[in-house]
Image (cartoon, rainbow, N blue to C red):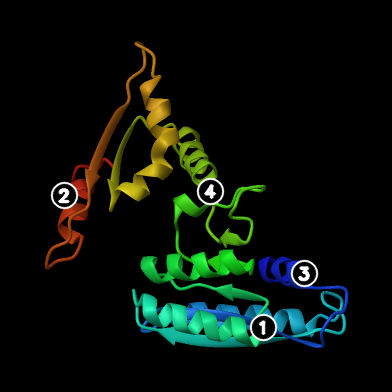
Amino acid sequence: MLILCLVKMSLSETIPRHMTIAAIFDEGGDPKHELAFRHAVRGINRNNDILPSVELKAEIHKIPPEDTYSAQRKTCLLLQKGVVAIFGPLSKSSSEHIRSITDSMEIPYIETRWNYRSQNVIGSDREYAFNLHPDITSLGRAYLDVLEAYHWKTITILYQDNDSMMTLKEIFGKTATVGPLETFRLVVKQLTQNHNGYRDVLREYSSRSQI
């Protein structure tokens, strides 16, 4: 559905027969992302009611992670070909570099990595950039709904970086307003990785039965 909306944004009064939607993926990334992209394009082409008289073509390029030079080179090449939209890579610097180019050219850009700073706001200067992940308010509300549905009074939050903490604002707001007759225990710990990965910290808190 997102591909469909972006293609329609790029249609002019004279609809071309063939249109290309591109994707730039990180080398060594999850192959499921490429499969999902190709499947979505095939699905639109199979349904003649979605884009009558239009056939989408999927063009995929791969670049080294965090390589802004390759990201710029591939993006400029795709724009010269007249693509109608671009899916971006997961690596932060490459994704942001591509987004700045597509913004200036007013080409729809689909961000595949979670980035709360780039949540699309209608009427903003980011109207051509879209993020596939839920916004932080909706995600935080969902976490809080789970907490309230199970009547949890003790939880442990394990987080990786400061950006991931942004999705927990709803929970922090709830626990900050707990009344004097209520009890609620909240433990927050940043994950640190060692030779065992995250197993040590997960084992520690699992044994405490706090999660």
Q: Which mark is residue 135?
A: 4
Residue 152 screen position, x and y as percent? 39, 33
Q: Element type at marker 4?
A: loop
Other residues around mark 3 within 10 Å, as few (<14) / some (14–19) / many (≥20): some
Label 4 to label 1: alpha-carbon separation: 30 Å
Other residues around mark 4 within 10 Å, as few (<14) / some (14–19) / many (≥20): some
The residue under label 3 is which amino acid type?
Lys
Q: CB under 8 Å between callouts 3 and 2?
A: no
**Which residue does the numbered mark 1 point to in the structure image?**
82
Label 1 to label 3: alpha-carbon separation: 15 Å
Residue 54 screen position, x and y as percent? 81, 84
Q: Nearer the viewer, mark 1 or mark 2?
A: 1
Note whether residue 91 is visible.
Answer: no
Q: Earlier in the sequence, mark 2 or mark 4?
A: 4
Label 2 to label 4: alpha-carbon separation: 31 Å
The residue under label 4 is which amino acid type?
Asp
**Which residue does the numbered mark 3 point to in the structure image?**
8
The residue under label 2 is which amino acid type?
Glu
**Which residue does the numbered mark 2 point to in the structure image?**
204
Label 1 to label 2: alpha-carbon separation: 54 Å
Q: Nearer the viewer, mark 4 or mark 1?
A: 1
Look at 69% across and 84% down and name the residue there. Answer: 42
Q: Earlier in the sequence, mark 4 or mark 1?
A: 1
Q: Is residue 105 left or right of residue 56?
A: left
Q: Element type at marker 2?
A: helix
Residue 23 screen position, x and y as percent? 55, 80
> Is 129 or 52 nearer to us in this picture?
129
